[in-house]
Image: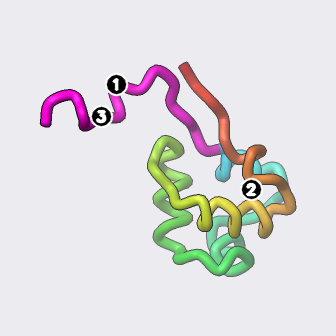
Amino acid sequence: MGKQRKLRSDRTHMQRLRVKEVAKEKGISMARLSRLADVNPRTVEAIFKDPHRDVAYSTLAKLARALGVEVADLIENTP
């Protein structure tokens, strides 16, 4: 088993989601974003609270569409 599993702390680069910042720039609240993107409000809240959480690409695509940006605009690579 040993080396097959990679933990988050083993990654050389982490990704940080910019959903909260982009929504704020556009004046869109968590509740409104949830409705516009058709994403569970608890999911949006969790992303706002923890920008390093793992999120399905389909969820990011919905959020990006609702915010009028590309998925890549919601992802920031961090050291």
Q: Which residue is at a point 84% across and 55% down the rendered structure image?
A: 69
Amino acid bearing label 1: Asp
Q: Position of residue 16 (x, y in %)?
A: 57, 38
> Where is mark 2, residue-wise?
23
Left or right placement of residue 36 versus residue 78 in this view: right
Q: Which residue lies under the disc numbered 1?
A: 10
> Circle 3 — which element?
loop
Whether residue 53 is situated above or below residue 5 in the rendered picture: below
Looking at the picture, which amino acid does disc 2 mark?
Ala
Q: Report the side of 41 relative to 10 (left or right).
A: right
Circle 1: is it few (<14), some (14-19), or many (20+) Cα within 10 Å?
few
Residue at x-position 51% and y-position 24%: 13
Q: Amino acid at mark 3?
A: Leu
Q: Percent position (x, y) of residue 36?
A: 74, 77
Measure the alpha-carbon separation of dots 2 and 1: 30 Å
Which disc is residue 7 wearing?
A: 3
In this view, 8 is above or below 12:
below
Which quarter of the image is occupied by the N terminus?
top left
What is the span of residues highlighted in magenta in the rendered image?
Answer: 1-17
Whether pointer 3 and pointer 1 mark residues with C-beta atoms closer than 8 Å, the reply is: yes
Foreground residue among 52 and 23? 52
Q: Which mark is residue 63?
A: none
Name the residue at 60% across, 66% down.
59
For numbered disc 2, what is the local secondary structure? helix
* First-in-chain label (2 vs 1): 1
Q: Left or right? Give the position of 55 relative to 3.
A: right
Name above or below for residue 68 compared with residue 6. Answer: below
Q: Quadrant of residue 77?
A: top right
* Applied colour scheme: rainbow
